[in-house]
Amino acid sequence: MQAVFTPEVLEQIFPPERSHDFFEALYGDADDAAFDIQMGFAGANGEKVQFQFLLVQRPGKCLACNLTYGLPAVFSRHPVINIRKIVEEVADTLDLPASRLQWKLGQTEPRSHDLHAIPLTITIQPE
């Protein structure tokens, strides 16, 4: 799966402009955001494929936990993040019907003072 979900493929699934558009919708000005959002591949185990939304602090900004802990609930329903579309694109990449994939967002995980991650687990259902 690592060879399938390369950084280039992940950037097609979640392009950098989606982070910009999200903060533009949230704040009215994307420059006010404290971090950028990127999609990363975290591994696969059986029927589970692990991704993560990486929240990367912008220079001169503060990535405070209180800014990121509520994001899983926001991401799960925000039309700009559009997890349903992300799952459809993962399904296309795996050559599977999207109806066989179920997703779940985990809680925000602080990795360092300038990087937090939100796990996205996609489970492939049997045919």
Image (tube, rainbow, N blue to C red):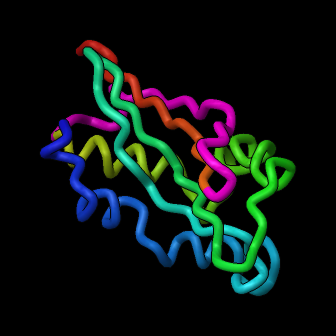
Q: Measuring 53% from the left and 53% from the top, which residue is drawn there?
A: 54
**Above or below for 13 versus 117:** below
Q: In this view, does 37 lie to the left or right of 6?
A: right
Quadrant of the frame with the N terminus: top left
Q: x and y percent of residue 102 in the render?
A: 45, 27
Q: x and y percent of residue 7 in the render?
A: 27, 59
Question: Residue 31 lies in magenta, yes or no?
Answer: no
Task: Name the outermost residue toward the right.
Answer: 66
The answer to which of 86 and 52 lies nearer the viewer is 52
How many marks are shown on the rendered structure?
Answer: 0
Span shown in magenta: 95-114
**Above or below for 28 versus 14:** below
Q: Measuring 64% from the left and 37% from the top, which residue is drawn there?
A: 109
Q: Measuring 65% from the left and 78% from the top, which residue is drawn there?
A: 59
**Above or below for 105 versus 5:** above
**Above or below for 114 versus 58:** above
Question: Residue 104 lies in magenta, yes or no?
Answer: yes
Q: In this view, does 3 lie to the left or right of 80?
A: left
Q: Measuring 68% from the left and 32% from the top, which residue is drawn there?
A: 107
Quadrant of the frame with the C terminus: top left
Q: In this view, does 48 lie to the left or right of 53?
A: left
Q: Is residue 32 left or right of residue 53?
A: right
Instruction: Give the quadrant of residue 39.
Output: bottom left
Instruction: Give the quadrant of residue 79.
Output: bottom right
The answer to which of 33 and 93 lies nearer the viewer is 33
The answer to which of 104 and 118 lies nearer the viewer is 118
Q: x and y percent of residue 95 in the render?
A: 16, 40
Q: x and y percent of residue 45 in the render?
A: 29, 19
The answer to which of 36 and 21 lies nearer the viewer is 36
